[in-house]
Image (cartoon, rainbow, N blue to C red):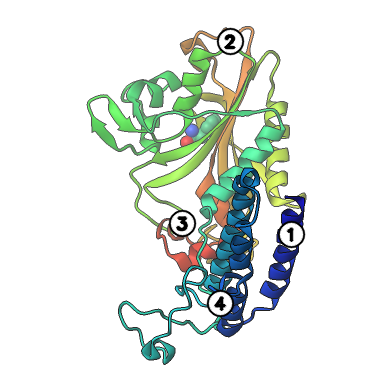
Amino acid sequence: MATLKDRIDGLRKTFEESALEAADAKALEELRTAFLGRKRGHVTLLFEDLKSVPAEEKGGAGQLINEFKEFVQGQLRTIGEKLEPGVRYGAGSIRTKSKFAAAGTVVPGTVVHPDLTLPGRKRYVGMRHPLTLFEEEIERIFLGMGFTIEDGPEIETDYYNFESLNFPPHHPARDKWDTLFIKGDLLLRTHTSPVQVRVMERSKPPIRIICPGRVFRRETPDPTHLPMFMQVEGLVIDEGVTFANLKGTLEYFIKALFGEKIKVRFRPSFFPFTEPSAEVDIECLVCSGKDPSCRVCAGTGWKEILGSGMVDPQVLKNVNIDPEKYSGWAFGLGIDRTAMFAFGIPEMRYFYENDLRFLRQFGAK
Ligand code: PHE
């Protein structure tokens, strides 16, 4: 048995060495004959010799030879596939090529021989959408500061979108969020603030969350407005949280996103759910304030990217958080609009047109 095994090992080595050199169909056929040839093939001879093996060793020896035969057949097939896809080697002899196929004509039922010198077919691998890439960048920065990510429904009730956020019914402040109503009490959320209310309802301070998502407003499309866009809102509630925390955190965030040198300004503003409130502008990265006719910043040199403020005590009361004990701040940022600046895109609509010439420029990061 040991000698049979040695013999097979030797043959296997010879086979492997010759296989490396088999560069065309002819060489492969020679290799097949040398090993599987009906009269003098090595494998055939091994089976021949099996006849003189004592009966009790026959089973084991036969198995070794069979395994080797399968190995040789398998290898021939693999090499053959590489040399000429579709042609079978190993079992029988090589199929003769059709003369049409050899001339490059495709004849049904025959083997096609591709030109092996042609470059392979490229398979296009997709990638993430630029808005997703940008959202993930924002998430990374906040995750690094200990925030967690929350999600909520896109179809909301009037209560979560407005009333809990301190907009009484018919209050004129609602006009700023031109709303797409569905039916009765249901509407498409105009901001991601309702997610914050839902989180405050179900958890106790300290709270440190961001909630990215899609929002909807009845807007006429222009370079920086669309009826559907992406927002990320953030909320911090704890004891002793001040406006200084809001400013420091947002400044850190904007610099992490746009670089140390970006110019940022806080401007007093109004939101029913925050008091005091501030809007944050960054310098216009499209014209750097130099183009009085810039369509993105309207020649002001600044572009508002987010709204923020200290959470109004009434909002805390609405969710049963004691405003005497806790305070907090919140912000809401337009992802699309900010991504336009980050990537230098002059038109928000590009994000939603699904034009691959645009989308492919963002590569697989
Ligand atoms: N929800 C506001 C908007 O959509 C943004 C905002 C969030 C402002 C949190 C202040 C605090 O415009």
Give the SS element for disc 1: helix
Name the residue tied to disc 4.
83
Give the SS element for disc 3: helix
Say whether residue 138 is left or right of residue 182: right
Q: Position of residue 225 (x, y in %)?
A: 43, 51
Q: Disc 2 or 3, which lies upstream in sequence?
A: 2
Name the residue tied to disc 1.
9
Q: Amino acid at mark 4?
A: Leu
Q: In front: mark 2 or mark 1?
A: 1
Residue shown at 47%/43% (left/top)?
230
138 vs 303, nearest the viewer? 138
Which mark is drawn over residue 323?
Answer: 2
Name the residue tied to disc 3.
351
Q: In front: mark 2 or mark 4?
A: 4
Residue shown at 57%/84% (left/top)?
26
The answer to whether any part of residue 244 appears in the image is yes
